[in-house]
Amino acid sequence: MLEKRPIVVDENMVVLGGNMRLKACKSAGLFEVWVDIAQGWTDAEKREFIIKDNIGFGEWDWDILANAWDTKQLIDWGMDLPVFDMPMDDEPKEEKEQEEKELCPMCGK
């Protein structure tokens, strides 16, 4: 039945999709699994596949996604990105700038 959901790898046998299936197969003691080689894919196509393959099931490292992926692409590919609450500074910007100007350049006080 695994042939219906093969492990997807690139030409270098790097897993692009099916990491958890592969892990489960190893745990089950299987020595052979169905593999689909994504030949001729560009890096951009591989990255898109990785995200789309995990949209409904993946566990995400939000720091990596925020720093290594384009937010617009992630949204276009169907990913629901969380909205993180950022603490808001109630102090107006002008007051903050004025306060910074009044600090002693020698001691910072």
Image (cartoon, rainbow, N blue to C red):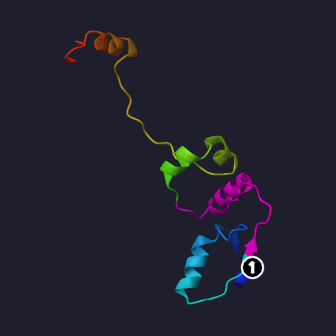
Tell whether 72 sits left or right of 99.
Answer: right
Residue at the (35%, 23%) spot, across then down: 90
Residue at the (38%, 11%) spot, across then down: 94
Query: Residue 49's image quarter?
Result: bottom right
Residue 20, position in %: x, y?
A: 57, 73
What is the number of callouts on the image? 1
Q: What amino acid is at disc 1?
A: Lys
> In what quadrant of the picture does the N terminus appear?
bottom right
Give the residue number, with chain letter if any, for mark 1.
4
Local secondary structure at mark 1: helix
Residue 37, position in %: x, y?
A: 75, 71
Magenta stretch contains residue 46: yes
Toward the viewer: 106 or 37? 106
Q: Which residues are magenta?
A: 36-59
The single residue placed furthest to the right in the displayed view is 40
Tell whether 1 sits left or right of 103.
Answer: right
Residue at the (80%, 61%) spot, across then down: 40
Asked if residue 59 is positioned above or below residue 33 in the image, the reply reads above
Toward the viewer: 68 or 87? 68
Residue at the (26%, 9%) spot, across then down: 102
